[in-house]
Image: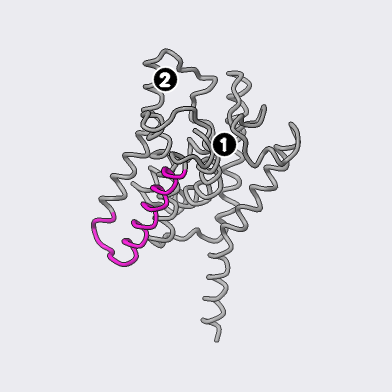
Amino acid sequence: MGFLSAEHVGGVAVVVGVAVALTVGARKYPGRWITVVSRVLAALVAAAEPSYWIGQAIHGVYSPRDDLPLHLSRAAEFVSAAALWWPTPFLVELTYFWGLGAIVQALATPDIQQHFPDPAYFRFYIGHGGVLVAAVFLVVGRRIWPRPGAPVRVFLATIVFTAIAGLADILTGGNYMFLREKPSAGSLLNFLGPWPWYIASGLLLAILFLIVLNAPFWFARRRAVGRSAR
């Protein structure tokens, strides 16, 4: 699928449109419908990755080397589905930071070969796009803000996940989390130096993303404290 092709722009536009509609609706018209919609969206997102496994198995090409959910964007699908069903603070924090940190990059430079209307096309946008929708819907629409210290918690969780992906790379010969080489479709990693330096650069970039994404909530809390002190 070509970058900025009609099918790429169309898929992203639908994702953004759904995110905006659900978020505005949740803020203006709160009610029981929010729980129903959250759980329907959770089921769709949670089913996206297993449907990919089934497709790979049917075609006889499923491989632990490539198809485990050990890229951050794929793991974020399961995390966001859980957050939509059980909106606990930590699950929402992971969904928000992973969704806006990793999924935006994945949607901007889609690493898929299939085209509309192939089922893999819909799986990609339902799975990855669903994470982005969940992140905005939960935090902005349902007002479940990241708590103080959220960037540190998410950073530590990401480090643990990266270590698991690295172990899987050793055991399977895969390239989970792109720890062995950069993605073929191109990404921000292309601007972060050669291997292995792009891993260290990516770590610093992740810290920057966490700080930037947390900034609105940090400033909001500071303003609230300032008002209460007057």
Disc 1 packing (10 Å; few <14; some 14–19; many ≥20):
some
> At label 1, which amino acid type do we have?
Phe
The image position of residue 162, as x and y in percent, is: 60, 35
The image position of residue 191, as x and y in percent, is: 71, 41
- Name above or below for residue 125 compared with residue 92: above
Residue at horizontal 48 percent and vertical 36 percent from the top: 75
Disc 2 packing (10 Å; few <14; some 14–19; many ≥20):
some
Q: Earlier in the sequence, mark 2 or mark 1?
A: 2
Query: Which color scheme did the rendering employ for the protein?
Result: one colour
Discs 2/1, front: 2
SS assignment for the magenta stretch, majority: helix
Taking the magenta stretch, the answer to whether it contains residue 14 is yes
- Name above or below for residue 124 compared with residue 19: above
Taking the magenta stretch, the answer to whether it contains residue 59 is no
Q: Quadrant of residue 89?
A: bottom left
| Residue 107 left/right relative to 210 | left
Q: How many marks?
A: 2
Magenta span of residues: 9-34
Q: Is mark 1 on a helix, strand or loop?
A: helix
Compute the Cα span from label 2 to label 1.
24 Å
| Residue 60 left/right relative to 22 | right
Q: Is mark 2 on a helix, strand or loop?
A: helix
Q: Residue furthest bottom?
A: 230
Q: Quadrant of residue 65?
A: top right
User: Label 1: which residue?
Assistant: 161
Quarter holding the C terminus is: bottom right
- Name above or below for residue 57 compared with residue 149: above
Residue at horizontal 37 percent and vertical 28 percent from the top: 118
User: Label 2: which residue?
Assistant: 56
Residue at horizontal 63 percent and vertical 21 percent from the top: 170
The image position of residue 54, as x and y in percent, is: 37, 22
> At label 2, which amino acid type do we have?
Gln
